[in-house]
Amino acid sequence: MDVETRIEGAVAVITINRPDKRNAINGAVADGMEAALARLEEDDRLRVGVITGAGKDFCAGMDLKAYLNGEKVRSAHAGFAGITQNRCTKPLIAAVEGHALAGGLEVALACDFIIAAETARIGLPEVKRGLVAMAGGLLRLPRQLPARIAAEMALSGDIYPITDFAHYGLVNRIVAEGEALAAAIAFAGKFVMNAPLAIAASKRLLRDGRHWDEQDMFARQDSITRPIYLSEDAREGAAAYVEKRVPNWKGR
């Protein structure tokens, strides 16, 4: 299969499995990724998704042969590779080894967190192929990097060591080569024990709140957070704290 999912406790490890093609995105990968994320979203036992690539590379972007053959590499609902416009409510972590280029970098940027090997390399080389990074790179990079640095990446098409961007906060952790996936799964442990409703609401506010006007942002926040404070899980969290025990989340 071009996309494989294995379950490790409450974590879904979703792997782009085309190592001979540097995990380039074709139609099968886009469909498989969308299906894997739908499974993550629908299964209450799963709390976090880790996205990675088989072999030496994370993802080299769009499969240009698939593009020339007219394959559909994006979903009407979830965007390029079945992920770049996905609205998953659960945390997504990119585990990056080797190259994350073009659409591959955009897949990583679509995740909430990036754990990368110190030898990983990133870039948006679309302009070198007469293309435009239209799967979120030109929209997300200027929000995560200084504008001039993002512009240099986008307009030069050059490939850079990911360590060049660590001090800008583009990645959460830099780890030894070959350790990105294990580190990402360990990192997921920060979230799997937390209340799912609160995680989903917090992620939504982090994603959407930056676009709200100051005049009504608290009112809009209240419409999302008030149901959380009235939920069974909120009472369970408070009770568990008082009783010095582990909470039993119900997701309601």
Image (tube, rainbow, N blue to C red):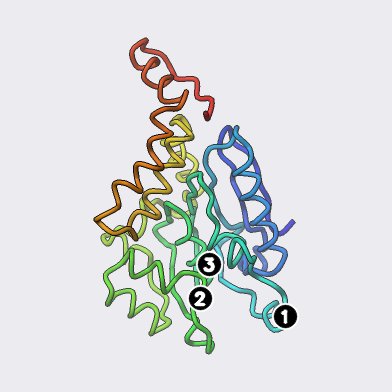
- Distance between mark 3 and mark 2 Cα atoms: 12 Å
Mark 2: which amino acid? Met
Residue 55 as seen in the image, left or right of residue 142: right
Q: Residue at x 40, y 54 (%)?
A: 207
Q: Nearer the viewer, residue 83 or 156?
A: 83
Mark 1: which amino acid? Gly
Mark 3: which amino acid? Gly
- Earlier-in-chain disc, 1 versus 3: 1
User: At which x and y percent is residue 167?
Assistant: 26, 60
User: At which x and y percent is residue 128?
Assistant: 49, 87
Q: Which mark is residue 70?
A: 1
Residue on which disc 2 sits:
134
**Neighbourhood count class around disc 2 (C-alpha, 10 Å): few under 14, some 14–19, many 20 upward:** some
**Neighbourhood count class around disc 3 (C-alpha, 10 Å): few under 14, some 14–19, many 20 upward:** many
User: At which x and y percent is residue 129?
Assistant: 54, 87
> Which residue lies most toward the top here?
243
Tell me the quarter of the picture where residue 12 sits: top right
Q: Residue at x 52, y 28 (%)?
A: 252
Residue 157 as seen in the image, left or right of residue 50: left
Callout 1 touching callout 3 (CB < 8 Å): no
> Which residue lies most toward the bottom here?
130
- Distance between mark 1 and mark 2 Cα atoms: 17 Å
- The secondary structure type at the circle numbered 1 is loop
- Earlier-in-chain disc, 1 versus 2: 1
Q: Which mark is residue 104?
A: 3
Q: Residue at x 47, y 49 (%)?
A: 179
User: At which x and y percent is residue 174?
Assistant: 37, 53
